[in-house]
Amino acid sequence: MTRDGSGIIYGRNAVKEALGSGVGIDKILILKHIEGSGKQIFAMAKEKGIPIRGVDRSVLDRVCAGGGHQGVAAYATDFVYRTVDDILRIAGDRGEKPFVLILDGIEDPRNLGAIMRSAEGVGVHGILIPKRRAASVTDVAIKASAGAALHMAVARVANIAGEMDFLKEEGLWIYGLDRDGSDYGAATYEGGLALAVGSEGRGLSRLVKERCDFLLSIPMRGRVTSLNASNAAAIAMFEIGRHLFA
């Protein structure tokens, strides 16, 4: 992978590799009217919700300091992803019952950052995010988290539903936020658990919802019938934390 000291990854193979790995990417610069494999990189970045900027070759030459960029450069973060096992180990090291947050397709990095800020404040041991069709921990997310992201274990996984099955095997109960669920304030939170939060527009996906042991809702008494994903996650996390860490 070709990468310089400023966090720039350049070259088609290098950027493609970064997109398929756990490297956080803030944005991609791509040559206007690029052809060949450059179109595939454009499609991959668009699918992941990574900002893309079409530029002239002179811009890429300057950004990459004359390196062989082949029409593509990516601004990468230094965020290091962890594993689900790491997250469970963190809980064990603290002598606490695991509290895991599962984000099912949060697409806005600012929302991701806001959720990470609340999660770190509550004492959540780690967060699961999907590799595809979801925001990764970019500079934008880190900034929105007010730096809390740098203190939070995040696992970027290929199969959220499969990891939920693993967490159940490890003895965790899984709660999901859903408008058709029962009042979150009346639930009993005992033992290790995970909280699943759906995407901003679609909520929980079918496969994730099916794997939840309990569905929770936040009662809305005003004219607005739903909350921003980061707000809903914060409300539920602090309520759960109040029980788990009392």
Image (cartoon, rainbow, N blue to C red):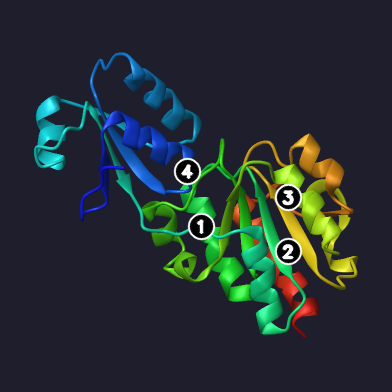
- What's the distance in space between the residues labelled 4 and 1, CA to CA? 10 Å
Kindly check if marks 4 and 3 are in contact, taking CB atoms under 8 A apart as contact. Answer: no
Looking at marks 1 and 2 on the same chain, the residue that comes earlier in the sequence is marked by: 1
Identified at 87% across, 73% down, the residue is: 190
Give the farthest residue toward the front. Answer: 1
Marks 3/2: CA distance? 21 Å
Which numbered dot is residue 236? 2
33 sits left or right of 17 in the view: left
Near-viewer residue (41 or 111)? 41
Residue identifier under label 3: 163
Label 1 sits on residue: 81
- Label 4: few (<14), some or many (≥20) within 10 Å? few
The amino acid on which the numbered mark 3 sits, given as a three-letter code, is: Glu
Secondary element at tag 2 = helix
Residue at 41%, 51% (x, y): give it: 138
Residue 127 appearing in the image: yes
Count of numbered badges drawn on the protein? 4
Q: Residues within 10 Å of mark 3 (few under 14, many from 20)?
A: some
Q: Please provide percent x and percent y for residue 219.
A: 81, 56
